[in-house]
Image: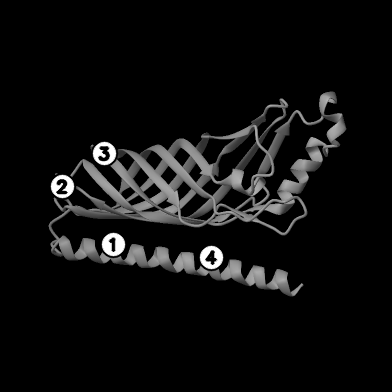
Amino acid sequence: STLDRSSAASDVYKRQQCMSMMKTVLNTAIFSVLFLSGGNLSAQVSPIRLGVRLGCGMSVNTGMDKILVPEDYYSNYNFKDKWQFTPTVSVFAQYHVDGSIIGVEGGFSYWQKASQLVYNDDKELNYKVTPRYNYIGVSALLKIYPWRKGFNISIGGRAGANLNGKGISYESNQEDNKFANYHFATVAETERLMKEKLTGQPDIAVGGGFGYEIGNHWAVDLRYFYGLNSTIKTERNDYNWAEHSTHGQNIELSISYLFKL
């Protein structure tokens, strides 16, 4: 349909814009490093190192309650957002001239955004909605070394494509006999409808954190990322689910091994 083609074209345009933004950030950071390092590279060891990073962390996605219950249809219920465990893997290149205060890092990453929304009410109905999305994309960070080595502060962002837009799971006790008079759909049918109507989106996030490089090869980083765009898009539906902005947050602790060139 024309609407589907328009939506697809919009998604492609957003991905192109996101890639363009990350390239601009990376190019700007590299120029800053070259300028501030004074170009005195001939007497230095190679400032470029390649690295592999493994990490884990916690993620949450707030605002989903306003999608499922957008208005005050009823009372005596509550929602709670719960953080979820997430992994991350990166392959990256780092540029830092020995003794320079500025460095830069850029690379390719895999990460997850996940959350769990828990519902309870006075009728003892409860359910859990757990979106868990996988992303692969690019990252670019400017790194500041206050003491010119070791400890560093990073700031930048990342952008990635969503690999599983239907990555929502659903659990509930709605099939218990005590709710028979409400004629609820089955748990499996409710989950199917959520996968169909609540679609995971690409991720564009800004963030930063603190790191420490140990010797010539090891590094530890603690970073935080905040999603600029909505994590979930609500498709047209007959279930009173409404479009509402949801923004994911990730806190990640990682360890890296760097190879000198």
Q: Amino acid under label 3?
A: Tyr
Q: Amino acid under label 2?
A: Arg
Label 1–label 4 contact, CB within 8 A: no
Taking the spot 24% from the left edge, 44% from the top edge, the residue there is: 152
Q: Secondary structure at mark 2?
A: loop
- The residue beneath circle 4 is 15
Task: Decide if residue 131 is in sight here.
Answer: yes
- The residue beneath circle 2 is 148
State the separation of the CA atoms marked 1 and 4. 21 Å
> Furthest residue to the bottom?
2
| Quadrant (top left/top right/bottom left/bottom right) for the N terminus | bottom right
Which is nearer the eye, 23 or 51? Answer: 23
State the separation of the CA atoms marked 4 and 2. 36 Å
Of the residues under marks 3 and 2, which one precedes in the sequence? Answer: 2
> Residue 57, image x and y in percent?
45, 36
Taking the spot 26% from the left edge, 46% from the top edge, the residue there is: 153
- The residue beneath circle 3 is 212
Taking the spot 14% from the left edge, 50% from the top edge, the residue there is: 99
Q: Amino acid under label 1?
A: Ala
Question: Which of the numbered marks, if any, corresponds to residue 29?
Answer: 1
State the separation of the CA atoms marked 1 and 2. 17 Å
Q: Is residue 57 left or right of residue 143?
A: right
Q: Secondary structure at mark 1?
A: helix
The residue mark sitting in front, 1 or 4, is: 4
Task: Decide if residue 46 is in sight here.
Answer: no
Q: Secondary structure at mark 4?
A: helix
Taking the spot 29% from the left edge, 42% from the top edge, the residue there is: 210
Label 2 neighbour load within 10 Å: few <14, some 14-19, many 20+ = some
